[in-house]
Structure formats: C-alpha cells, structure tokens
Image: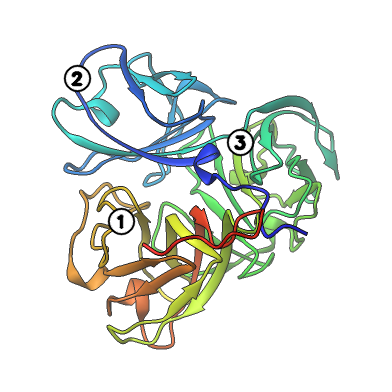
Amino acid sequence: MAYTDIDKPSDYFNTKLYTGNGSDAHGITGVGFQPDFVWIKNRVATWNHALFDSVRGATKKLESDTTDAEQTAANFLQSFNSDGFTLGTSGTANASGQANASWNWKAGTTGSGTTTGSGTGKAYSYSVSTTAGFSIVKYLGNGTAGHTIPHHLGATPKIIFTKIIDSGSFPWWTYSEVIGNTKHLRLNGTNAEDTANTIWNNTSPTSSVFSVGTNGGVNGNDDPIVAYCFAEKQGYSKFGSYKGNGNANGTFVYTGFAPAFFILKRTDATEQWLIKDNKRENNFNVQTGTLYANLNNAEDTSAVVYTDNLSNGFKLRGTYNGLNASGGTYIYMAFAENPFVTSTGVPATAR
C-alpha cells in the first residue's frame, strides 16, 4: 500500500494570502483549484472570520467567531472560480489595502438525498472529495434523537464542525474523535470539552453517517444546518492529540507530513482555538503568527505562541497555556504541504 494517495496536497487544500482593494468583483487567483470551502480572516484588523461554501452558496457567510445566523449579501464572496474566488466590496474580506489570509478546501462531487435514522427523513445536499476526506453537508433537522446524516466520505470522520444556519442562538457544535461522542467543543468559544447526550446522541460517526441528538443547534426540526466533515488521509491530513510540557523546548507532534496548516485547541481548560499556516511566514522557523478561530483579533505575533514546522510534523516552542501547558491536553487538525514519503516511496526533502 502506498504511503499516500495525494502527492500534491495543494490540489485539495491551499492557503492563499491577498490584499483587499475595496472594489467590486475583486478576483483572487492562485489557489490552484476551484474551492468549495473558503475561510477568510483579515490579518491586521478586527474583522470577523468569514466562511463560505459551495453548498450553501457563494454569497452566504458564516462566522467561526460568533453564533450569528447566516448572512447573505452580494458584496461578500461573489463566486467560486477555477483558480480561486471573486470578492465584493464588503470589508469583511476585501478592506482596501488590508492583508488577508484565506484557507481553501476542495470537495467537488455533489449530490442530494434524504437523511436516515430515528424520526422523519429530511432532505440534504452535499459536496465531497473522498480522496481528500472532506465533505460539506447541508441538512434539515428533524428534532428526534438518533437522526443520522450521510456524510459521503466513505471513511469515518474524525472532526465535524456544525452550525445552524437560520439562528444565532446556538454555537458551532464541534465533534472530535479524540474526546469522544459524549462530549463536544464550541468552535466560536474558549470552552473546555463538555458533556451532553443531546449533541452527538452518545453515538460515534460511522463510515457512512454521523448521528445527532435533540439539541436545536444540530437537529432543530426543519432547521437548516451545515456540517463540515473531515476524515483522515495518510500523508495529507491528521487529526489527533498531544500533551503539553510547559517548556519552550516543547512537545513534538508527528503528523507524517510537513504541515501547511493546523488548528490547535486545549480541551481540558478554557483556551483559544489557534490557527497556524505555512504561508504567512514563508516557511521560516520559528513560526510566530497566530490567528484565533474564535476571535476577530488581528494576527498575534507574540513569542508565547511560537511553533516550528518540520518535515514530519510540528514542534511547540512557546509556553502559552493555549499551546503547551504542562500536562495540558490538546486536539489538533493538520493538512500537509508535502507528504513525508510520496506514493512512489520518495522521502520529502528537508526545508
């Protein structure tokens, strides 16, 4: 069996940096593919995160740092294009002269169907890449515990982010295989892991479906909900956990590839969601630039959130409790710049 089936990870995930110009129909190119999920954050100002996907539609925005309902406007992201996307005049993603980071994922195979499990089946639609282990699913809740939602990955998802679209009353309920099906996190908050059977119905996802309970944020009757589902692919993506050591010579986390992007969250205490990528600092170690998925803050270059990107993982270089507290437990999701070994058995070169 080949080490990886994805020799060029940037065909499925890529970070694209750009400067806004405040003008209508501002085209951003250089992504390398037509994205289905675009996550944008202004790096220098306190604009909210802006999340767009091809299943809900290009002009529809969610914010990872708030509980707000979906907002629709033609001056947000206007279209997904063959090599990027087009922006409108909104400062959220296109403030004149301001630096932005965009994180882009490809899905691409679309379809629709009816949900299964307990209660009445409801309509859903999706876009998926089984190669990259990523799907976007928009479904209607049915209000009944044990409602099962097809994700079409053909593999068991290890991370799921969900958000009810038409209400600002519920957080981004987040599933992680590491903490298990009885617990959940909030992408828009600092909360430690919490326990409730009404979110994931105390049921782990399978290779075909994930299950939801009666909580309105994941299963309100006839309420539209979006789920971003991620399955692990060797040499391309890794979703796991580590323990901090509280030392500037911190824990090394093996991923099996040089990371292009990763998110970290402490699960046993109240801390931020940290976002790192390989483009904002041109691959030079130590990496200082951090954005926070749950905050609208500008990029943080504080020394306490230092990390190193290595050919087979990442290493913590800071003592910040949100990154590397002694004995602290953390989850992460990471995507590759290069696999450690290609599908033909060629090792990746060191930086």
Q: Secondary structure at mark 3?
A: strand
Mark 1 or mark 2: whose residue is earlier in sequence: 2
Which residue matches tag 3?
A: 225
Q: Quadrant of residue 96?
A: top left
Residue drawn at x 74%, y 25% is 111
Q: Amino acid at mark 3?
A: Ile
Q: Secondary structure at mark 2?
A: loop
Q: Is residue 240 left or right of residue 24?
A: right
Which residue matches tag 1?
A: 283
Q: Amino acid at mark 2?
A: Gly
Crowding at dot 3, Cα within 10 Å, few <14 / some 14-19 / many 20+, comes out as many
Q: Are marks 1 and 2 in contact (CB under 8 Å)?
A: no
Residue drawn at x 74%, y 58% is 201
Q: Quadrant of the N terminus?
A: bottom right
Q: Position of residue 77 (x, y in %)?
A: 38, 22
Q: Position of residue 216 (x, y in %)?
A: 62, 44
Q: Is residue 320 left or right of residue 163?
A: left
Q: Quadrant of residue 222?
A: top right
Q: Is residue 140 left or right of residue 18?
A: right
Which residue matches tag 2?
A: 22
Q: Position of residue 56 (x, y in %)?
A: 56, 25
Between marks 1 and 2 in the image, the one whose residue lies nearer the viewer? 1
- 231 vs 134: above or below: below
Crowding at dot 1, Cα within 10 Å, few <14 / some 14-19 / many 20+, comes out as some
